[in-house]
Structure formats: C-alpha cells, structure tokens
Amino acid sequence: MVVLSTGDVLLVNGAKTGSAGWDDARDPNLHPVLYKFQTDGTGSKFTVLNPSNIPRMYHSSFAVFPDAKILIAGSNTNLGYLDDALFPTEVRVEKFSPHYLDPNLGMFQQEIIVEKSNNQVKYGQKFTTQIRGNVEIDQQKLQVTIYSPPFVTHGVAMNQRLIQLGIVEFNKYVALNTNNIVLQTPINSNIAPPGYYMLFVNYNGVPCRRSMWVRILP
C-alpha cells in the first residue's frame, strides 16, 4: 500500500490467499487498486486500474519518486532465490504512472521554483514555496504535502508518512504565471520527525512536475 502525494492510497501488490510466502502464496493480485478519500460527501471510492503481468507478493518493495511515479520491484515467495518455482524470484523492476499523470491533466501541473523556496525549516515556522504554471490558480484546489520516504521490505512500508501543510497565505502573480505560497510547518516532532521530506504542490489533484526536498531541523 503506497500513500500518494495527494493523500490517495495505491494498493500495488498482494495475493488472494492467507499466506504470502514460504511457497504457499497463490492467485497474485495483478490489478493495482486506487483508494480515494473523498471530502465532498460522496463517500470514499475504490477503483481497479490496469494490470501488470508481474506478480508482486512477499518481499516486494516500492519507492515514490520525486516526479510522483512509483518504482515497484521484487517478489519472492520462496525459501531462497529460485528461478524454477511456481512464482520465481522476481528481478524485474517497473515504473508505475498513477492516474494523475494522464497527459490530459498536464495543464494542472505546477513547477516548484527551488531557488526561490525555503528548503530548511523549523517546527511551527512559516516558510515560502514559489510555483509556476500555465493556469490561474484557484486556492480551493491547491494542496501542499510533505512525504517521508519509507523503508520498504517484505511488502511492508516502515514509517510511511504523508502530512498536509496549512496554507497561511497565497500571493498571486509575483511574476509572470508565478505565485508564492506561505506554508505552516508541523508544530512538533510527534507529527513529523526531524529529517528530509519531499514537498509536493498538488493542484486539482495533480502533483507538481518534481517535488522539492525539504529538511525539518530538530
């Protein structure tokens, strides 16, 4: 289960039986499933996506890239590395493009201007991120999140964490097609432990072209 930069959840691996490993796994789930949490009162929603042809079960792993794509690798239900088992040890790697990277949504992608944005912050501090895009921004459709890249093993993501930052102020057109967002950092380390996070600016449900690394200082 991968938490996306927008707050949606992507299920990218698993099997349809109770056992995941030790040569007992059967019926791999090849279809990724998107879980979208709705805030408009219409109820949350599961959507089945286009399948892969590679089973991803026990020992599978993933990583979220700065461009909001997902790297998916691994799968080994065997005791040891085997290439002649029912589900051989998997060495192929895939890059998955979630729904928000549909070319028809490209107009909504923003670009973070890194040299004009703060990349080191402290708890309870306000800081500025500057963005550039091709459409006029409706602040109600703007969302900024920070994502802590987790350690993934055995199909389980340790310390996966996504936090939505409060937008304190939004300044339109500080330059051509350029806007400043004043953001509020988390108030303490219980919400966001010190360290490095990928900051994503999502507009109309579409992540920015590339996230920016932000460090929260102790």
Image (spheres, rainbow, N blue to C red):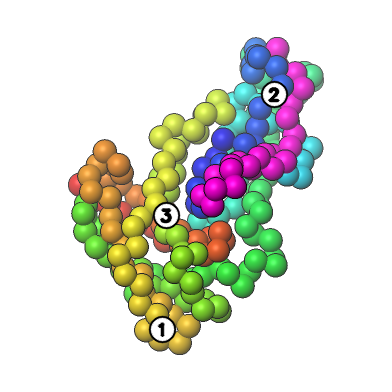
Residue type at mark 2 is: Ala
The verdict on residue 24 being magenta is yes
Residue type at mark 1 is: Tyr
Identify the element where label 2 is drawn.
Answer: loop
Residue 190 lies in what quarter of the image? top left
The residue indicated by pointer 3 is: 145
Q: Residue furthest front?
A: 41
Residue at the (77%, 22%) spot, across then down: 27
Residue at the (61%, 72%) spot, across then down: 107
- The residue lying toward the viewer, choosing from 171 and 117, is 171
Residue type at mark 3 is: Thr
Mark in the foreground, 2 or 3 = 3
Identify the element where label 3 is drawn.
Answer: strand
Q: Report the disc number at residue 15.
A: 2
Q: Which residues are magenta?
A: 23-48
Distance between mark 2 and mark 1 Cα atoms: 50 Å
